[in-house]
Amino acid sequence: MTVSVPPVPRYVPAPTATEQLDYADLPIVDLSKINTPEGKAELATTVRDAMKDKGFFYVINHGLTPEQNERIFNVANVPLDQVSDEEKMKFDGKLQQTGSYQGYKPRQYWHVDNGVRDQIEHYNMNKDLHRKGHPNALQPYLPELEEFIKYNHFNILHPLLRLLALGMNIDEETFIPLHNFDRVGETFLRFMKYHPRSEDDEAKTKNVWLKGHTDFGTVSILWSQPVVALQILCPDEKWRYVNYIPNALVINAGDALEFLTGGFYRATIHRVVQPPESQRGYPRLGVFYFGMPDDDVKLSPLPDAPEWVDRRFKNEEAPTMGDYRKGRIIAYGNSETKKVDGKETVEVQMIGNVLVKHYN
């Protein structure tokens, strides 16, 4: 990124957790290897196996320095801590009405469990930053945020999509035309902060801050941060923590990738829980880039995709990305779910023709 940058207040993150925790054993992908044919072939196998076996993996050597990483977290804190509540209301995303993540999601918007509402705030920006206005405090940083979005899109998302295609032995460009930068779609950058909760809320929700769920796009990119709270549901049905690797990325698959690949890659179930004792009382600031196909892309298996392993819907009933995205956003945390399979921890709801599960 070559944009000149104005000064920004420094965000001081939580200290690294000191506890010995049950961490998921996740592969580490060195993205710099993609620049040679041999390296790309090796990475394609690694990424395929990681996404199929674990559903999550780390990416290192993505091209941005630790200093640039620190800078983006400093900027991420601006719309969350440097904007008044009154101004935030002007940029309220009104998720339930719009079915779009653009603007603010205020705290206590979603129901978590037993009457407890969330303490999560985020500010979301479409890949086209000019589609909506932004708070005054964020205006000086828009040029570098535009560069950061493009970097995530073309230098991280697209290379990973190519590796995922190669892992299926299909043309490496297969997913690229579905993820255009200049077409109508909801690929977006998110700045997100989890605020500490009361002990009463922790008890009522069994320490769950965000229920187990799958993302609804293709590839989710999380810029690693030190607060240990993200867990994934492993194949042995145990929840394990995702560890912190400085200046790394945490990558996972979403529903759209599962639908487009006929189940070859599966959307990964994950949740957020109360951090360990050494990090309690600290907020958890996150930076995400959520990749999604263009709104008009039909989420049925691509011609080269293998047969469905677990058919979620008939091909002719496949929603477009736009319809599925709107349904998921409008319904999440604000609509009724039903317990299934005799499991108190599994809830389901229908989004169009798709059965969506939530895990607690």
Image: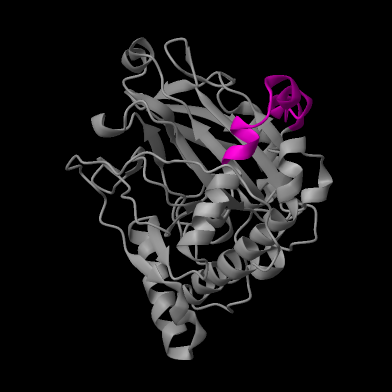
Q: Residue at x 62, y 24 (%)?
A: 106
Q: Residue at x 57, y 52 (%)?
A: 72
Q: Is residue 5 left or right of residue 222?
A: right
- Residue furthest bottom as drawn: 37
Q: Is residue 159 magenta?
A: no
Res 45 quadrant in image = bottom left
Please tell me which residue lies in front, 339 or 252.
252
Instruction: List x then y, in percent, for residue 253.
Output: 48, 54
Q: Is 102 situated above or below 187?
A: above
* Quadrant containing the C terminus in the rendered view: top left
* Residue 307 in sight here: yes
* Residue 351 in sight here: no
Please tell me which residue lies in front, 211 or 12.
12
Q: Is residue 82 magenta?
A: yes
Q: How many marks?
A: 0
Q: Is 114 situated above or below 345?
A: above
Q: Residue at x 69, y 61 (%)?
A: 147
Q: Is residue 21 left or right of residue 260?
A: left
- Residue furthest left as drawn: 20
Please tell me which residue lies in front, 230 or 211.
230
Instruction: List x then y, in percent, for residue 191.
Output: 58, 41
* Quadrant containing the N terminus in the rendered view: bottom right
Q: Residue at x 80, y 58 (%)?
A: 183
Res 9 quadrant in image = top right
> How is the protein colored in the picture?
one colour
Find the magenta span and give its range. 77-98
Q: Is residue 123 left or right of residue 278?
A: right
Magenta stretch: helix, strand or loop mostly: helix
Instruction: List x then y, in percent, for residue 117.
Output: 50, 16
